[in-house]
């Protein structure tokens, strides 16, 4: 029997949370009817009714676990989700960006690779987001490849991994926000873990909650942090 954990950070998602979780569970039952799975919702500092909705979902469905954090932090939410996950094969999804067929294929690929990444930047991917967000994704791709020499083109969005491999290192990751997974994947590249990328189709089901300028400034700020940490990350090559 296939088993896996889905980790979904949630922050101010009251408009779509219940509907999206319902759709996700329906798709899992359709595509993977005999799978054993859990959904770990990590609520991190929402100011709307997301927590109440997540509590109701956890109460109604045995497959759903709720983890609550006091402050907004995408990275910390992913980290805590990994801690609470029950199964070794773990997936990171956003509530507005998931694909059950990605789960199905990744469960097979994890027999050969340590990480499977759903990349928006592959040639066969279909990215229907606004141009500003595409530009930021491309900037990040070029930076990671040129500066860190990584083999992957995307670190944000859907990914699958072997939980037992990353748990020993998650507390060493310095980034706490959206670059948590970037730093983690760079670290694991230097640890010589294996990666496989898959193309994805992406379109927004809601308007972005952050302006292009805010996202750009946050990206530049996190770029700076990663640049200063290159020496620290490279040390993992010698372990």
Image (cartoon, rainbow, N blue to C red):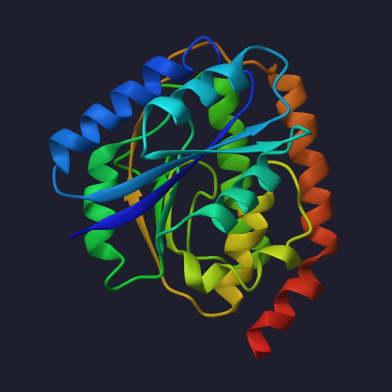
Q: Position of residue 167 (x, y in %)?
A: 59, 68
Give the residue drawn at x 22%, y 49%.
104
For residue 10, above or below residue 33: above
Task: Indicate the position of residue 50 as horizontal and vertical percent values.
Answer: 59, 18
**Residue 94 location, x and y as percent?**
49, 33
Instruction: Name the one closer to the observer, 199 or 208.
Output: 208
Q: Residue furthest bottom?
A: 238
Residue 97 figure quarter: top left
- Kindly identify the residue that appears in the image at 55 percent across and 65 percent down: 150
Position of the C terminus by quadrant: bottom right
Horizontal side of 30 relative to 162 (left or right) equals: left
Closest to the observer, 201 or 28: 28
Answer above or below: position of 138 versus 35.
above
Residue drawn at (79%, 33%) of the image:
71
Residue 165 shown left or right of residue 75 in the figure: left
Quadrant of the drawing holding the N terminus: bottom left
Looking at the image, can residue 221 be seen? yes
Between residue 118 and residue 151, name the one nearer to us: 118
Towards the viewer: 162 or 221? 162
Query: Which residue is pictured at 47% across the width and 19% down the height?
Result: 17
The image quadrant of residue 139 is top right
Residue 96 visible in the snapshot? no
């Amino acid at each position: 029997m296939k088993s896996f954990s889905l980790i979904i950070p949630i922050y101010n998602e009251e408009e779509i949370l219940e509907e999206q979780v319902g759709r996700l569970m329906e798709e899992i039952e359709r595509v993977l009817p005999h799978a054993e799975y859990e959904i770990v919702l990590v609520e991190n500092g929402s100011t709307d009714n997301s927590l109440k909705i997540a509590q109701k979902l956890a109460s109604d469905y045995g497959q759903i676990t709720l983890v609550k954090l006091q402050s907004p932090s995408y990275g910390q939410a992913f980290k805590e989700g990994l801690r609470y996950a029950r199964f070794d094969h773990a997936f990171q999804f956003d509530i507005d960006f998931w694909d059950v067929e990605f789960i199905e294929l990744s469960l097979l690929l994890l027999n050969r690779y340590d990480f499977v990444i759903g990349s928006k930047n592959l040639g066969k991917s279909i990215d229907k987001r606004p141009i500003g967000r595409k530009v930021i994704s491309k900037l990040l791709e070029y930076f990671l490849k040129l500066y860190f020499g990584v083999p992957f083109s995307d670190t944000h969005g859907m990914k699958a991994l072997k939980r037992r491999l990353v748990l020993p290192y998650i507390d060493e990751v310095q980034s706490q926000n959206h670059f948590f997974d970037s730093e983690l994947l760079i670290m694991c590249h230097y640890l010589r873990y294996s990666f496989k990328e898959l193309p994805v189709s992406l379109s927004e089901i809601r308007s972005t909650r952050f302006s292009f300028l805010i996202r750009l400034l946050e990206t530049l700020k996190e770029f700076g942090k990663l640049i200063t940490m290159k020496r620290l990350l490279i040390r993992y090559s010698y372990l």
